[in-house]
Amino acid sequence: MSSTPHDPFYSSPFGPFYRRHTPYMVQPEYRIYEMNKRLQSRTEDSDNLWWDAFATEFFEDDATLTLSFCLEDGPKRYTIGRTLIPRYFSTVFEGGVTDLYYILKHSKESYHNSSITVDCDQCAMVTQHGKPMFTKVCTEGRLTLEFTFDDLMRIKTWHFTIRQYRELVPRSILAMHAQDPQVLDQLSKNITRMGLTNFTLNYLRLCVILEPMQELMSRHKTYNLSPRDCLKTCLFQKWQRMVAPPAEPTRQPTTKRRKRKNSTSSTSNSSAGNNANSSGSKKKTTAANLSLSSQVPGLGAIPNCSLNPGRDGDLCHSTAVTPSGQFKEKH
């Protein structure tokens, strides 16, 4: 099939200046094409630094990779973090795979404020095995990707749900060993489980232990502590978080209401005492009115106000002047 100008990989015969480039923001699937191309450039000498550079190019620093499938003993779901993703891809090739690429068909894209989601219900992970025999494995399922909405457009979440797989053996190999029943019996056996090699499955099982130990490894790398000391420190900090009481919400300080003292004495006192108390009460009332008027603007002095003390010493009835000049009774 010849390429057309609508093809994102179309090369114009008039030179590179007439070629139409499709930006990442228009077709996020182009990043999967670049990932396939990078995996094809892998060599036998590719070390851990090469795989770390591969993961840095296509995955965010806080990215997660999830695989869901069903084995003979039940459904499985494995989720690994960014530090374990490079090793996951390397185990695929350590299990005898010589080529790995992904095919996305009829994918749907949705754009958000800070991310782009690609949902492909017909995704195929194709692996070419060179050992123990030449076999092509097509692992089909649903792939959901979340890209960051920026220039790098790296993967933030990767979720591949495997539904089925097929192992394809060339007919020429079957014809070569048609007279050997032992070889035919060997060819009839599956070399993968749900499209995954035993190396990858063992690594995913190991990640169940390695993923919670990321804190210990990070502490050992940062503070150069022994494994036992790292474990003691992490357990002690976790115990502190468990036994520490929850932080109480900050409460606003409540303003206490001032109580006005009784300026008059009991009516059972003598007439001499009443005269002295009445003169003292006038001074206290005037001082109280002056202090209130100075603190609250718009509140004038209260002439001829009657003060009746309550049972608890509070005012049960008073007369005040509102800022508008009207009298108001408070109970």
Image: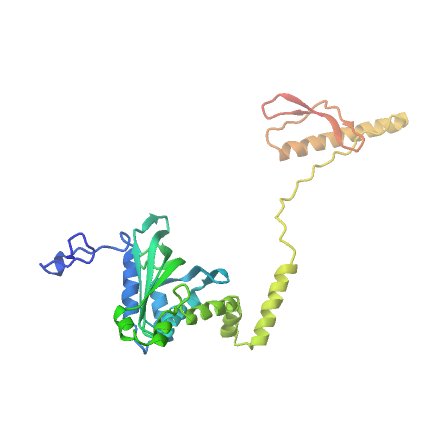
Q: In terms of depth relative to the viewer, which is nearer, 26 or 151?
A: 26
The image shows residue 22, relative to residue 61, as above or below, that is above
- Residue 181 on image: x %, y %: 35, 75
The image shows residue 165, relative to residue 265, as above or below, that is below
Identify which residue is drawn at 37% across, 56% down: 141
- Residue 284 on image: x %, y %: 75, 32
Return the residue found at the far top: 326
Looking at the rendered image, the quarter that the C terminus falls into is top right
Q: Is residue 132 visible?
A: no
Q: In terms of depth relative to the viewer, which is nearer, 232 or 142?
A: 142
The image shows residue 249, relative to residue 58, as above or below, that is above
Relative to 202, is 35 on the left or the right?
left
Identify which residue is drawn at 38% across, 58% down: 164
Q: Quadrant of residue 262?
A: top right
Identify which residue is drawn at 81% across, 29% down: 264
Q: Quadrant of residue 328?
A: top right
Relative to 117, is 320 on the left or the right?
right
Identify which residue is drawn at 75% across, 27% down: 316
Instruction: Report the coloring of the rendering.
Output: rainbow
Q: In terms of depth relative to the viewer, which is nearer, 216 or 37?
A: 37
Relative to 7, is 157 on the left or the right?
right
How many numbered markers are drawn?
0
Q: Is residue 110 visible?
A: yes
Return the residue found at the far left: 14
- Residue 5 on image: x %, y %: 15, 53
Looking at the rendered image, the quarter that the N terminus falls into is bottom left
